[in-house]
Image (cartoon, rainbow, N blue to C red):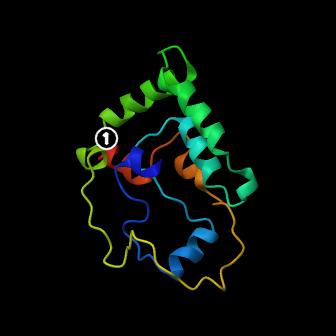
């Protein structure tokens, strides 16, 4: 979902190694540089939950997305999408159409890594503050400058 919404692969700017795996276990989650509707952020957050038992099943995700796919402007998702679009229009083009350079050690193919000493997974302490119903501080700063 992150890549579809942001246009960027997750963690494109980080080396895909044991350190990234540790950071993810410690709560690192992808950050958005655009406004994302709160209902969508809530679903993303559930999908990224450190506890697999708290993640939605595929059928639930399908049902939610199916319900949203023909929204009208008066539905909650419709209102949130409209609000996000209005905010995103005022963002710099660099946020909306990101050009990026992939880290030289960001690997998007299957490979074996040694993950014997990973910490117990946990959720991000500040994911709500960073992403729920707000855009990143970088984006806010660029709006005020």
Whether residue 46 is situated above or below residue 37 in the rendered picture: below
Q: Quadrant of residue 22?
A: bottom right
Tell me: 9 left or right of 51. Answer: left
Taking the spot 64% from the left edge, 39% from the top edge, the residue there is: 59
**Residue 76 location in percent, x, y?**
57, 22
Closer to the camera, 102 or 38?
102
Residue 33 visible, this orientation: no
Q: Quadrant of residue 96?
A: top left
Taking the spot 26% from the left edge, 66% from the top edge, the residue there is: 101
Tell me: 52 left or right of 4. Answer: right
Closer to the camera, 49 or 67?
67
Q: Quadrant of residue 51?
A: bottom right
**Residue 15 location in percent, x, y?**
41, 77
The residue that mark 1 highlights is 91
**Residue 14 location in percent, x, y?**
41, 72
Residue 30 visible, this orientation: yes
Dot 1 falls on a residue whose secondary structure is loop
**Residue 140 location in percent, x, y?**
39, 46
Taking the spot 53% from the left edge, 48% from the top edge, the residue there is: 131
Crowding near the residue tagged with mark 1, few <14, some 14–19, many ≥20 C-alpha atoms within 10 Å: some
Closer to the camera, 33 or 63?
63
Tell me: 102 left or right of 113. Answer: left
Taking the spot 25% from the left edge, 50% from the top edge, the residue there is: 94
Label total for image: 1
Closer to the camera, 125 or 68?
68
């Amino acid at each position: 979902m992150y890549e579809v919404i942001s246009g960027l692969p997750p963690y494109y700017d980080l080396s895909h190694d044991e350190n990234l795996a540790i950071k993810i276990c410690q709560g690192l989650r992808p950050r958005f540089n655009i406004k994302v509707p709160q209902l969508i952020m809530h679903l993303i957050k559930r999908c990224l939950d450190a506890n697999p038992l708290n993640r939605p099943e595929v059928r639930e995700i399908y049902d939610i997305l199916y319900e949203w796919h023909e929204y009208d402007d008066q539905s909650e998702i419709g209102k949130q999408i409209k609000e996000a679009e209005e905010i995103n229009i005022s963002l710099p083009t660099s946020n909306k159409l990101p050009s990026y350079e992939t880290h030289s050690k960001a690997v998007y193919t299957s490979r074996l890594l040694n993950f014997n000493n990973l910490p117990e997974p946990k959720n991000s302490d500040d994911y709500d503050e960073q992403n729920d119903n707000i855009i990143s501080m970088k984006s806010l700063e660029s709006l005020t400058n």
